[in-house]
Amino acid sequence: MGAAVIDGKAFADTLRGKVGAAVAAFREQTGRAPGLAVVLVGEDPASQVYVRSKHKATVAAGMESFEHRLPATAAQDALIALVERLNADEAVDGILVQLPLPRHMDEKAVIAAIDPAKDVDGFHVINSGKLAVGEEALVPCTPLGCLMLLKDRLGDLSGLEAVVIGRSNIVGKPMAQLLLQESCTVTIAHSRTRDLSSVVRRGDIVVAAVGRPEMVKGDWLKPGATVIDVGINRVPGEEGKSRLVGDVDYAGAAAVAGAITPVPGGVGPMTIAVLLRNTLVAASRRAG
Ligand code: GUN
């Protein structure tokens, strides 16, 4: 028996449709569209692709998209001044500063400058603190998208063993907080974890967010586990082409797991759909 495939693309399309309908209602009520400002510093090719797809999705959902580009040589003060202008701009409900920033900039200082009420990435310490103590927060898009897929698949998560592999501020830590809030028994594993395969085998839920191609093997998994693969790794493929793989060895895992997200088409499409959702949430809260 192979694992069920969790179709993140279909789920994300449905979520985008729901956000689009709610945006139309918001426009009707307030006379304006929710606005998302995306700031790109420099010319990192992957970041340019992300920013372009965020812009397209924002417009497709009926929201205003404001794009701001600064050269890679820009001073940090110039970026913070731009963030402060966006904080004060009534037409802007969400602010996203695309990461990574050039090396001469301090990401923490830039994120700290964003108004927490407009922090649709959920990266500001006010939002991570609120998430940790269970207050209403803006929650990072990728882990929130993973949680939506898990709840859609499993329903009530209470009492399940969840193993999160990876401890980043963007995915691993907020993912663990969200699963804890759902009353899972949560383990965070990382690069220093000893006997990782035994830890992973405890998981009814395994979320892999380590950025190492096909690291999690099928025989590490508890049979029937639900596997969420956050990894997007480009590796050499056939005929000199490259291909995308996750952090999980898909073929091996699909033979053991109960359900698994594919790469591509699993978690990836959820991130932008949740970004749109977070922007709508921020706009609705600001509109009071
Ligand atoms: N770079 C890669 N992922 C993300 C994300 O979710 N938000 C931002 N701001 N930058 C990123």
Image: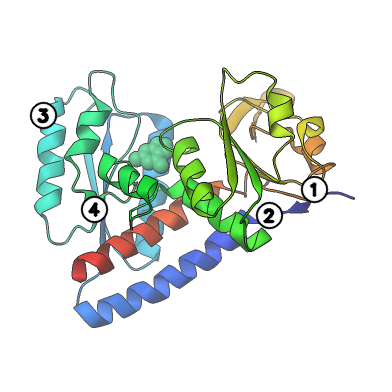
Instruction: Give the percent coordinates (x, y) of residue 25.
Output: 33, 80
Badge 1 marks a residue whose secondary structure is loop
> Which residue corresponds to mark 1?
224
Residue lying at the far bottom in this picture: please name it.
28
Badge 3 marks a residue whose secondary structure is helix
Numbered disc in front, either 2 or 1: 1
Badge 4 marks a residue whose secondary structure is helix
CA gap between label 2 and label 1 equals 14 Å
Is the residue 83 above or below the residue 13 in the image? above
Mark 2 vs mark 3: which is more N-terminal? 2
Badge 2 marks a residue whose secondary structure is loop
Looking at the picture, which amino acid does disc 2 mark? Ile
Q: Tell which of 187 and 28 is nearer to you.
A: 187
Label 4–label 1 contact, CB within 8 A: no
Lateral position of residue 154 relative to residue 122, left or right: right
Q: Residue at x 32, y 59 (%)?
A: 279
CA gap between label 2 and label 3 equals 43 Å
> Which residue corresponds to mark 3?
77
CA gap between label 3 and label 4 equals 20 Å
CA gap between label 4 and label 1 equals 40 Å
> Which residue corresponds to mark 4?
118
Mark 3 vs mark 4: which is more N-terminal? 3
Ligand number 1: quarter of image: top left
Lateral position of residue 30 relative to residue 44, left or right: left
The answer as to whether callout 1 falls within 8 Å of ligand 1 is no
**Label 3 crowd bin: few (<14), some (14–19), many (20+), radius 10 Å:** few
